Image: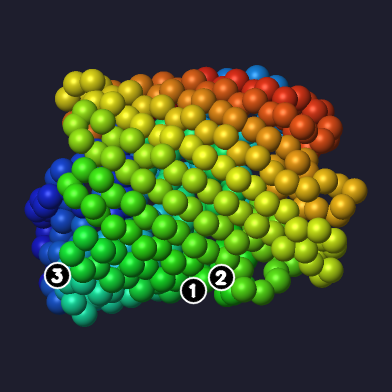
Amino acid sequence: MAALGPCYADALSTPSLSGPLVANPNPISFDAGPLGNIYVGGVASGFGAYTSDPERPVGDLNWRWDASNAEVFIQKTDGWFQFFVQAGAYNLLSLGAPLFSTGTETADLFSAVPVAYAKFAPTSSFSVLAGKLPTVIGAESTFTFQNMNVERGLLWNQEPAISRGVQANYASGPISLSLSWNDGFYSNQFSWLSGTAAWAIDSSNSISFVGSGNLATSTKTSFSTPLYQNNSEILNLIYTYTASPWTITPYLQYTHVPSSAELGLAHSGETYGAAVLATYNLSPNWNLAGRIEYINSTGNAAEGAPNLLYGQGSKAWSFTVTPTYQYKVFFIRPEASFVALSNITPGAALGSDFSHSNQFRALLEAGVLF
């Protein structure tokens, strides 16, 4: 019989937060009888944003006000059987891309239950997850509250966010390994293989290698499934330095889309990207985060190469700065970002006619982690 009143536990590690935001250290917990303790938490936040040169033909606006997160987390964190469910509304803000309404993003991306999985953990070092899983690819996570910056970056735009599938995890000492069979960019075609290998060199330094790719050809395309990216191969090399007051994460990214008669691609295409993400702890309540990145794509339209950025052969760089103030479970984060493009294809870039090369965005996110 479930207990009628709440008890409390330490802050939970799921969903993961890279900082500077810190999860509620006292999440509600209910005794669910044979299941044990069930923990309940969540995030409620809103944002206001100004974007120069919005993509009006797809519904983007100069000014947008909306919820960025209205989600609840329900999870069991011990024993051989565990689970995690994340449910609610969300907005996945990212650089160099239109801002859609939260209702549109929730409905057209991963539904009102974007993450939900069962976890089987027969030992402390080995586990298997099955369900709707956060991707293992990249240095930035899916939802705004998880990251140093409110918006995800240009490199993140090349990576899957949520995939359906299974994932095995193994950890021994400083080594952590993961292997996942999944549907990549939420395609519902289970042909992606993803893996990570991480080494915690010492308490301040770690490095990880990520490899992922589609082992088949998928013709599905949708709001959550970009055609060419869903047929790509992705490599990341990620280094993280953590020693108060700094956290610094430089990483490299490479993607490759092979030629394919089925997709109408006579030539392959690649992207090469590099980014540095950093946060500096100014005080117990204030942090300053920043990100700088560069990405380059190859090929040209005449060769029949895929458009992976803002036209075949286009390039882009960005800069983002995000001060964060958190008091207990309350937080507020202003942010300024700038994106600059080159070698664009008119009709595939930014602005009201998709032919502009620069975009500035200022936004403010505020909310509570409960």
Q: How many labels does the image show?
A: 3
Badge 2: residue crowd in 10 Å (few <14, some 14–19, many ≥20)? many
Residue 52's image quarter? Answer: top right
* Residue 93 can be seen, yes or no: no
Q: Is mark 1 on a helix, strand or loop?
A: strand
Residue underneath mark 1:
181
* Quadrant into which the N terminus falls: bottom left
Badge 3: residue crowd in 10 Å (few <14, some 14–19, many ≥20)? some
Amino acid type, callout 1 = Trp
Amino acid type, callout 2 = Trp
Color style of the picture:
rainbow
- Disc 3 from disc 1: Cα separation: 30 Å
| Mark 3 touches mark 1? (CB < 8 Å) | no
Spot occupied by residue 34 in the image (x, y as percentages of width and height):
15, 76
Instruction: Answer left or right for 358 relative to 40.
Output: right
Instruction: Answer left or right for 87 relative to 317.
Output: left
Residue 84's image quarter? Answer: bottom left
What residue lies at 65% left-to-right and 57% top-to-bottom? 256
| Mark 2 touches mark 3? (CB < 8 Å) | no
Spot occupied by residue 134 in the image (x, y as percentages of width and height):
43, 58
| Mark 2 touches mark 1? (CB < 8 Å) | yes
Q: Which of 99 and 316 is in front in this view?
A: 316
* Residue 345 can be seen, yes or no: yes
Q: What element carries label 2?
A: strand
What residue lies at 23% left-to-right and 52% top-to-bottom? 201
Residue 155's image quarter? Answer: top right
Most distant residue in the right direction: 302
Q: Which of marks 2 and 1 is nearer the N terminus?
A: 1
Q: In this view, does 308 lie above or below 82?
A: above
* Quadrant into which the C terminus falls: top left
Q: Is mark 3 on a helix, strand or loop?
A: loop
Residue underneath mark 2:
192
